[in-house]
Image: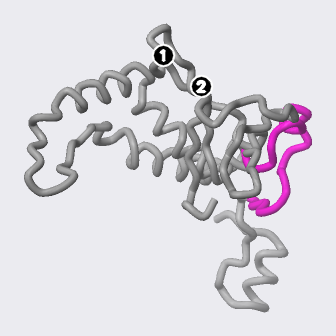
Amino acid sequence: MKWPGLIPLARRFLFGSAKTHSPKALYYPTATPTTSEYYEGMNKYYRWFRQDELVRKCIVTNAYFACMSAGYETVLEAAGEGVDVEDYGFVKERVDEFNKRVNMDLMLFVAQVKRSIYGKARFEVVLGEDEFPKKLIPLQSDKLKPNINEVWEVTGYRYQGRDGFYSPEEVLYFVNLPLD
């Protein structure tokens, strides 16, 4: 028989047979648990996402089931009575074409992950030669700030410290709540 040692025996004698071991995994709710230089320049929310395995798995699983599990499908709905949806099938085909072109399934997945990390997700809309969206490029969500005029209209975006870097038409913007 293996003896547990003096301290565990004393604990058992003084406090009963309940285990008093500390958890093996330490949880750091507000601090980064590493001093690695690799994490120094990261946004604090992204660093948290990268270092906390449970948080990362929850966010990615949520995004997967919200966006990728069933796929993205465009649905036409009648705008009013007497409107035949079948007459507007060409609209659905065109929207599906653009969604496929920009890989909307993946972009919605990325947007959901970024919204969970930063509270918002922003993409640069790159137009093709036909002046329609060709691709979406994820932007650093914490570096893009809207320029708003006195009547609360977005006039452009400041990105990485440069005012007016993007016009309102060049950015696709997702937020956690409409209040944002």
Give the left or right position of residue 36, taking residue 99 as reference: right
Give the left or right position of residue 59, taking residue 102 as reference: right
Number of marks in picture: 2
**Magenta stretch?**
26-46
Q: Earlier in the sequence, mark 2 or mark 1?
A: 1
Q: Residues within 10 Å of mark 2 (few under 14, many from 20)?
A: some
- Residue 107 is tagged as none
Q: Residue at x 31, y 37 (%)?
A: 71
- Residue 137 is tagged as 2
Q: Residues within 10 Å of mark 1 (few under 14, many from 20)?
A: few
Q: Residue at x 49, y 8 (%)?
A: 129
Q: Position of residue 57 (x, y in %)?
A: 54, 48
Callout 1: SS: loop
Mark 1: amino acid:
Glu
Q: Residue at x 31, y 22 (%)?
A: 97
> Which of the image's four quarters has the C terminus?
bottom right
Q: Residue at x 37, y 27 (%)?
A: 99
Give the CA separation, mark 2 to mark 1.
Answer: 16 Å
Q: Position of residue 58 (x, y in %)?
A: 53, 53
Give the labeled residue for mark 1. 131
Mark 2: amino acid:
Ile
Closer to the camera, 2 or 35?
A: 35
Give the left or right position of residue 17, taking residue 70 as reference: right
Callout 2: SS: strand
Q: Position of residue 159 (x, y in %)?
A: 79, 34
Please identify the dominant SS of the magenta region.
Answer: loop
Q: Quadrant of residue 80?
A: bottom left
